[in-house]
Amino acid sequence: MDSASLQHRTIRRFKPVKIDYRALEDAARATSTSEFLQSFTLIRITKPELRAAISKISGSLALRQDNGELFIFVVDTGRDIRLTEPGSNVHTFTNWNAFLAGAFDATLAVQNVLATAERSGMGGVVLGSILNDPQQMIDLLHLPKYTFPLLGLMVGVPETVPDQKPRLPRQLVVGEDSYPTFQADAMADYDQAISDYYTSRGSNARPETFTSLVRRHLGADQKHRDEIGAILKAQGFEMPQELK
């Protein structure tokens, strides 16, 4: 197995060097896709003012730098709808299954681009934080109906390489033939591993465990994320309750 797949680190600071962004775009295009519909669109962000606006939405200071490439991955069933016969019932491309298929396609493309970058000595950070204000993202990118901005990805040559964050142990995330039994001892050990990581790292050291991260997330301000269902509906997608 390629050991590079086990070496992922979140990279937020990049050297001021050009990268082959077209090779990354091609990696996105070559990604596995549901039913070969390729229901996503990739947008490369080049305008400084647009990047600054997206930085404000995501709250990511890294986006304010000029370094690294920024891509936005968009769920897109609108392209398929354009190919249907006039007057056709487009339910197949607007229902919840269609949206999920587009979300799968976009997410797989993000991972494929990041993996390609990492194999080439680059790194990156996935930005779910663009969903802090999805409507503004739609407006900024002039997204048409039947599309939705799902994830951002920033990639480049790392300025520094941070320590790798410990991941959940195998016994907590891997089952065989059935859902794995929760093991409190394994979680306690993982909490300690996370605590050791955060207290020993070079910058932004703090007391932290995985349990405390989860509990803090529970009380986090979701900003505009509770509006996602209404925004999806406005973009032309049918919500599950509408399908009953």
Image: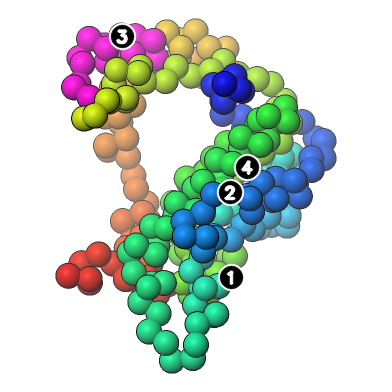
Q: Which residue is drawn at 27% across and 15% down?
A: 187
The kind of residue tagged 4 is Val
> Residue 24 is drawn in which quadrant?
top right
**Which label is found at residue 113?**
4
How far apart marks 4 and 2 lie (CA) works out to: 9 Å
Residue named by callout 2: 31
Magenta range is: 179-195
Residue named by callout 1: 142
Please tell me whether mark 4 or mark 2 is closer to you in this view: 2
Secondary element at image label 2: loop
Residue 221 picture location, percent across and down:
34, 44
When the figure is inspected, residue 21 is found, relative to residue 2, above or below; the finding is below
Please tell me whether mark 2 or mark 3 is closer to you in this view: 2
Mark 4 packing: few (<14 Cα in 10 Å), some, or many (20+)? Answer: many
Mark 2 packing: few (<14 Cα in 10 Å), some, or many (20+)? Answer: some
How far apart marks 1 and 2 lie (CA) works out to: 25 Å
Question: Of 52 and 127, which appears nearest the observer?
Answer: 127
Residue 68 picture location, percent across and down:
71, 40
Residue named by callout 3: 189
Q: Is residue 239 in view?
A: yes
How far apart marks 4 and 1 lie (CA) works out to: 23 Å
Question: Of 46 and 164, which appears nearest the observer?
Answer: 164
**Residue 53 located left or right of residue 26:** left
Secondary element at image label 1: loop
